[in-house]
Image (spheres, rainbow, N blue to C red):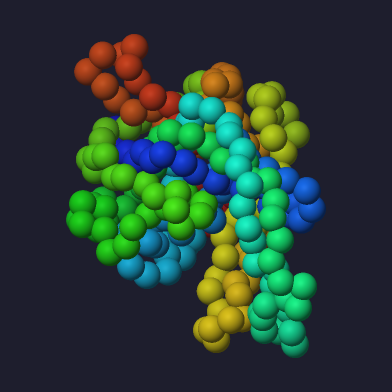
Amino acid sequence: MDKLLEIQMSGWTATPRLPFILSGNAICMHTPSYSLILGIIGCCLGRVVLASELQIGFRYSYQTIARDMETRQRLENNNGKIKKHNKGSDAYIREFHTFPKLTIWLNRLDWKEYFENPCGTPSLGRSQDILKIESVTIVDVKGIEKGKVGGTMLPFIPNLQIAGQLVQIAESFIENDEVGMGRTPVASKVFLSVPHDNDSEVIYNNLFMKIHSEPTDSVCFYLHDFENE
């Protein structure tokens, strides 16, 4: 039996945007990406968190998908630096999730105090998609070979038999030193974003079960190891 740090969060809205959709509506993924989860953790710690520092498991759910019209500012790359586009702003339709819930599991028990007293205000997507930290606890877990998972992202393998959304995205990013130079993507991989309402039984590496006093309340999740995937 092992121990992990469990952080439970909730909010009013969330926008885990599907990347590379540059025209038409902004569409949400079924789940956040691992780079977005790293950003949430870094916000609470008050610094950039590298993928090599931890292992992450998460489960994400929401009530409904809604749409709204927003204004966005166009940007362009000018000799390696980002500046405002000369065409100015435009309006577009953006998807968002309502009443999201996010549970994160980390193998960093020593970070517990940062989530109890976070340095920043975590958000899931846009700055207005604020998350409330509901609880921070250390939980007992055990490794399992097979279990039902949902509301998470699994690195895609050919024999993976579970419904979801295939996306090729950067596993994480490295912040560049110079302001305005953006970020450098690390390890672009194909992931399967599994909806929260599609719990399916899978055989997969790094599956864990959270131990409850009642076996029927046990929760299964995948713990992502950035270095070994």
Relative horizontal placement of residue 84, taking residue 46 as reference (left or right): right
The count of marks equals 0
Relative horizontal placement of residue 4, taking residue 201 as reference (left or right): left
In the image, residue 90 lies at what x, y percent? 71, 61
- The residue nearer to you, when weighing 213 against 123, is 123
Tell me what residue is drawn at x 52 percent, y 52 percent.
Answer: 125
Q: Quadrant of residue 217?
A: top left
Image quadrant occupied by the N terminus: top left
| Residue 113 shows in this picture | yes
In the image, residue 12 lies at what x, y percent? 41, 39
Tell me what residue is drawn at x 22 percent, y 18 percent.
Answer: 213
Above or below 162: residue 3 = below
Above or below 147: residue 207 = below
Q: Quadrant of residue 204?
A: top right
Tell me what residue is drawn at x 21 percent, y 52 percent.
Answer: 116
In the image, residue 19 lies at what x, y percent? 69, 52
Q: Quadrant of residue 31?
A: top right
In the image, residue 149 lies at what x, y percent? 52, 26
Relative horizontal placement of residue 183, taking residue 74 as reference (left or right): left
| Residue 157 shows in this picture | no
